[in-house]
Structure formats: structure tokens, C-alpha cells
Amino acid sequence: MKRCIFVLAVLLFTCLLSASDPVFYCNFDDTAEPQMAAGDKTPKLEVQPKFEQGIRGRALLVGMDADKTRRGVSYSNEKNLNWTQGAISFWVKPVNWKGSDTGFFAPFFTAGAGKNYFLIYKYPVGETLYFMRGELGFWLFSQYRPGEWKSGEWHHVVCL
């Protein structure tokens, strides 16, 4: 399993009710509690969150850290995710990997409800960032090749 650390900042689930009304927003500026949530705001954490310098303010450290502690946060997707419309948007900075690396990577985003499933994941073979949605086994795929991403550089990812 490849050791992976990345910093996630301004995780913005703009699963839009309209162009100006996000149903969930968390800026991760030294807190895992969202600034806006249509559903449950309680962050689910296995370990205490760790924050580092972001683009503006602080950013949440996600993935396997140097002590081999897996870091991340999850939230209820009930009412916090609109399955029929909207976008998921976030900033990511690879800390100890680059876009062309292969091996295991923690998912950037996952959500599931009934037969609906959504995943944004850096696939372990090749240099592909997958956007997968749908019923398990019947995925709709989109992909991006982050081969030019370098460790320490910020990138904005949006999935519509």
C-alpha cells in the first residue's frame, strides 16, 4: 500500500438547490464543522483532525500521515448531498506524491445512499483520477489524468 498524504482545503459540496444555494459547505479553516449544512452538521472522525496552511487560512490533512495514522472526516449525506443536480468542488495539494505516481491512494470523496454511490478516486493503476457515480457495478465514469501534478502544488477539482 502506497503511503499517501494530501491536504484538502475548501471542500465545497455545492450540490445546488439553485446557483447560489449550496446544501453543504465546509472551509476546514481549523475546524471540521461545516459552515453550512442542510442535514446533520456533525463531523465523523476516527482521530483528531490535523490542519496545515491552506490557500486561505487552514486546510484539513487527509490520508496516511508520517505516523501511519489514517486521517479524514465524513459527514451524513442525507440532505447534505443532492443526487439529482449540483457539483462537488474542492482544492487538493499532494504532499508526498505527484500525479504520475501509481499505488494505493485514499479516495478524495465518497458518498452512498441506497443504490446511489459516488466516488472521486485516484486509481492505483496509471495516473487517472476517476469520477464514478451510479449503482455498484453499473458505474458512470469520467476521468482526468493529473500526470503533471507536483507535490506541494494546489489544484482545484470540480465534478458536475
Image (cartoon, rainbow, N blue to C red):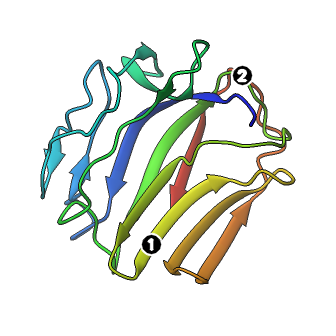
Q: Which of marks 2 and 1 is nearer the N terminus?
A: 2
Which residue is at 42% across, 23% downward?
59
Q: What's the residue type where badge 2 is placed?
A: Asn
> Would you name the residue on which mark 1 appears?
117
Q: What's the residue type where badge 1 is placed?
A: Tyr
Q: Pinpoint residue 49: horizontal percent, then vertical percent.
A: 35, 22
**Front in this rendered view, residue 9 or 96:** 96
Work out whether 151 lies above or below 120: above
Asked where in the image residue 16 lies, by quadrant, the reply is: bottom left
Work out whether 87 lies above or below 53: below
Which residue is at 76% across, 47% downward?
146
Does residue 14 appear left or right of residue 55 in this picture? left
Can the viewer see residue 59 in this picture?
yes
Which residue is at 35% across, 24% downward?
47
Work out whether 42 lies above or below 69: below
> Would you name the residue on which mark 2 appears?
96
Q: Is mark 2 on a helix, strand or loop?
A: loop
Can the viewer see residue 160 in this picture?
no
